[in-house]
Image (cartoon, grey):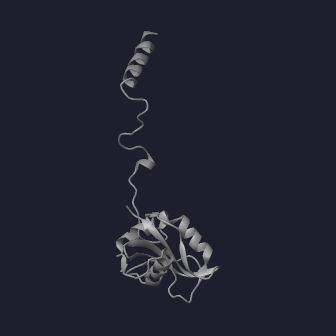
Amino acid sequence: MKKILLSTTIVLALAACEDPFNRQGVGFTGIDGEPRTISDVPGAVAFVPPATNVPAELAELPTIAVISDQVDPIKKARVAIDNGGVSPDNAVQLSGSATDLFLSTVDVNGTVYGVLRTRNSATRVDNSIGAIFGDETERFTGCLAAGDVFGKGSSSRSSGFAVPLNCS
């Protein structure tokens, strides 16, 4: 009985030295503890595709600066849409629908707009895309919307959308 009591006391004394909530292992902790590698070969088990981060891509592009005599917010937004980028040098190409859209930032007389537009004004998209762009402005641009979304087109289809941004 003394041997069992002595060994139990030693085990409890040693266990009391460690924090019971600290689950950090030491050394080899099994299969999950092995270092993991990644592969750049598509189809490999450890392949990790490059993540798309639209606000980071947009932040790397220059803001297109435009000076206009327009003062009405709707007309300034249309100027922003007309001057929005459509090339990889000044816009992020968003694909996934039937029509490729281009996201850029345009500064019209000191007001920065997030612009989502088609490649040319003859191509139109449903206005529901503009509503989604307005609701998800922060997710797309990394900035808060500072006003309403303006479209350029008809009441059902538009060639582009612009929303003033608050990036401070």
Residue 84 figure quarter: bottom left
Residue 120 placement (x, y as % from top left): 51, 88
Residue 20 placement (x, y as % from top left): 43, 29
* Residue placed furthest toward the right: 156
Residue at 62%, 73% (x, y): give it: 128
Whether residue 8 is visible here, answered yes or no, is: yes
Q: Nearer the viewer, residue 74 or 90?
A: 74
Above or below, comparing residue 152 to residue 50 in the picture: below
Q: Nearer the viewer, residue 8 or 112?
A: 112
Residue at 64%, 79% (x, y): give it: 155
* Residue placed furthest toward the bottom: 122
Above or below, comparing residue 48 to residue 129 in the picture: above
Residue 56 figure quarter: bottom left
Residue 45 placement (x, y as % from top left): 48, 64
Count of numbered labels shown in the rendering: 0
Quadrant of the snapshot with the C terminus: bottom left
Residue 58 placement (x, y as % from top left): 40, 71
Whether residue 51 is visible here, answered yes or no, is: no
Residue at 44%, 45% (x, y): give it: 30
